[in-house]
Image (tube, helix red, strand yellow):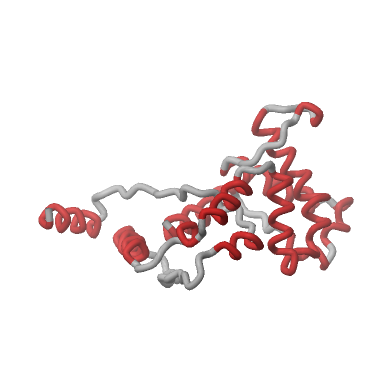
Amino acid sequence: AEGKKAAFLDDVTKGDTNLKNVTPKVSDHLTRTKILGNIKKGAELNKVPKPSEELTRAQKYQFRKDRLEAKGESFVEKLDKEGLAFFNEIATAPFSEQAVAFLNAYWGEVGTQAEFIYSVAWDKFKYADMHARGVNYVHKYKEGNMLEFDIGLYFYEKLCKFLEDEKNSDWKDEKFAASQPKLMTAIVRKKEVVDARTLIY
């Protein structure tokens, strides 16, 4: 067994082995108001520092291995039964309810963006979901609770184009600076997300 493990690690170092991406079991929609209140007392998350430079495939494998071996539990594992149930409930709620939960949890940080979220972002988000489902009429739309990655990019692009239009200049006011997206190609955006996932998982 030790010999096989050593051979595998040797292959990884040489870059001959394809590593599979691991996805989280729980959605990342976080309502910290109630969740953080249900984290088990005395529980602490052990952090593994995130590398700042571009890593080789073998180094990424080693980084993930170090994180897995770090003593402690994941955030979800730190939740008690009630907290985890609430976490999963929010993650499967319709988009508008997720937005309410998000604003309730982070009102101190993003409360000033509520008008933008519901007047602009939510509208574009809804139409992105309609586009993904092939729904042409709002009255036939049934609100969803999750966007595929490519549709998320589509939403982002539509939001950028909306703000580029001169007639929507009011929404580019300084008070909505935190909500202003930065336009980039889907390839660049996807690379950022994939790189982040690789380092995290």
Q: Is residue 76 shown above or below 147? A: below
Residue 59: image x %, image y %?
32, 64
User: Residue visible at 73% across and 49% down?
Assistant: 159
User: Residue visible at 89% across and 51% down?
Assistant: 167
Residue 67: image x %, image y %?
37, 64
Q: Is residue 182 visible?
A: yes
The picture quadrant where one finds residue 170 is bottom right
Q: Is residue 60 left or right of residue 85?
A: left
Q: Is residue 175 left or right of residue 184?
A: right
Quadrant in which the C terminus is drawn? bottom left
Residue 120: image x %, image y %?
80, 50
Residue 97: image x %, image y %?
72, 47
Q: How many marks?
A: 0
User: Residue visible at 18% across and 58% down?
Assistant: 10
The picture quadrant where one finds residue 176 is bottom right
Relative to the observer, which residue lies in front, 45 or 66? 45
User: Residue visible at 82% across and 67% down?
Assistant: 174
Q: Is residue 85 left or right of residue 178?
A: left
Q: Is residue 56 visible?
A: no
Relative to the observer, which residue lies in front, 50 or 158? 50
Relative to the observer, which residue lies in front, 58 or 96? 96
